[in-house]
């Protein structure tokens, strides 16, 4: 039996904000698995994550909600493909983006039989001194913002002849997922405090226990799938605790201009029960 997620965790797992999830419930596009009759709190099953990811892909293609509903409720593959094709033909001006999103959508609708589940690692991260940039941002600006902030941190440390002691990372407040606007902190570990300069400050990144998985490639390339897999694992093993999501960037724009080589580690805060690694079966 699939595990249940509160609407906030479902929002984090699928990158659909809470306002959108409530709207999709009202119009019958994505109804929660259960609604508390007294509090009205919505809960979703982890097996609804793929449907939410499909909806997010279609919305990324600017498909109207009524057409998405028709696709999801059409049992005939030919009719469903005709609906999808008709919309794709209206998006020829953005063909490159359309082709990438459509390929991802096909994998979601019919996952490859030989697909390998991601490896999920438990990691205890110690408190770490770092140089950091913190701001309140919109989620649509997150990718450009973190790359700019991380580049600024690398440049400042290089100017002061300070060698980073580990890969850069970021801490994303839950509001950034819930409301598509919230606080974000990008940091670059280094030994000892860093003198505040401009928007760069000194920070001790708090210790944390994390479940981590890896996303390969740019953030525009299906990072929500890694988030969904991680949320399912954490929920199924009853490990989740309150706390912000973390990302670490062992290979990014500072290391290579080839986005296909980028490597992002996504960390979900947990209470570690001793099951150290989730290996593919």
Image (tube, helix red, strand yellow):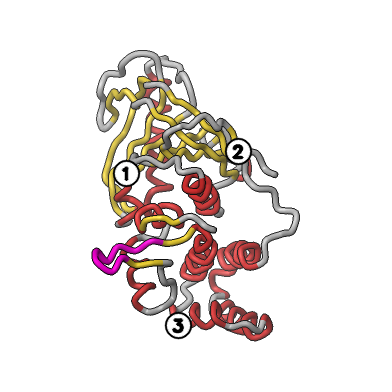
Q: Earlier in the sequence, mark 1 or mark 2?
A: 1
Q: Is residue 83 magenta?
A: no
Vertical placement of residue 165 versus 227, above or below: above
- Measured as percent of width and height from the top left, residue 102 is found at 61, 67
Count of all numbered marks drawn on residues in the image: 3
Q: Is residue 85 left or right of residue 126?
A: right
Quadrant of the image for the N terminus? bottom right
Q: Earlier in the sequence, mark 1 or mark 3?
A: 3
Tag on residue 213?
Answer: none
Label 1 neighbourhood size at 10 Å, few (<14), some (14-19), many (20+)? some
Which residue position holds label 1? Answer: 173
Vertical placement of residue 80 versus 186, above or below: below
Distance CA(mark 2)–CA(mark 3): 39 Å
Label 2: which secondary element: strand
Which residue position holds label 3? Answer: 66
Label 1: which secondary element: loop
Vertical placement of residue 39 versus 241, above or below: below
Which residue position holds label 2? Answer: 278
Residue appearing at x 32%, y 44% in the figure: 173
Distance CA(mark 1)–CA(mark 2): 26 Å
Quadrant of the image for the C terminus? top right
């Amino acid at each position: 039996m699939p595990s249940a997620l509160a609407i906030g965790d479902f929002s984090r797992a699928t990158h659909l904000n809470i306002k959108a999830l409530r709207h999709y419930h009202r119009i019958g596009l994505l109804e929660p698995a259960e609604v508390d009759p007294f509090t009205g709190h919505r809960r979703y099953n982890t097996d609804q994550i793929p449907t939410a990811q499909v909806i997010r892909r279609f919305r990324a293609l600017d498909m109207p909600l009524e057409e998405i509903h028709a696709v999801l409720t059409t049992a005939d593959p030919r009719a469903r493909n005709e609906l999808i094709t008709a919309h794709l033909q209206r998006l020829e001006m953005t063909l490159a983006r359309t082709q990438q999103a459509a390929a991802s959508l096909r994998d979601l609708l019919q996952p490859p039989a030989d697909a390998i589940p991601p490896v999920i690692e438990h990691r205890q991260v110690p408190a770490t001194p770092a140089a950091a940039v913190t701001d309140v941002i919109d989620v649509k600006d997150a990718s450009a913002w973190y790359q700019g902030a991380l580049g600024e941190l690398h440049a400042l440390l290089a100017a002061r002849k300070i060698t980073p002691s580990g890969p850069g990372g970021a801490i994303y407040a839950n509001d950034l997922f819930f409301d598509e606007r919230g606080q974000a902190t990008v940091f670059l570990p280094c030994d000892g405090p860093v003198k505040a300069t401009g928007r760069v400050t000194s920070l001790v990144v708090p210790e944390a226990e994390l479940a981590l998985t890896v996303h390969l490639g740019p953030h525009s390339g299906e990072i929500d799938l890694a988030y969904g897999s991680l949320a399912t694992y954490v929920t199924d093993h009853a490990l989740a605790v309150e706390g912000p999501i973390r990302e670490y960037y062992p290979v990014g724009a500072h290391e290579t201009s080839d986005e296909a080589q980028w490597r992002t580690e996504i960390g979900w805060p947990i209470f570690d029960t001793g099951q150290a690694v989730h290996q593919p079966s």
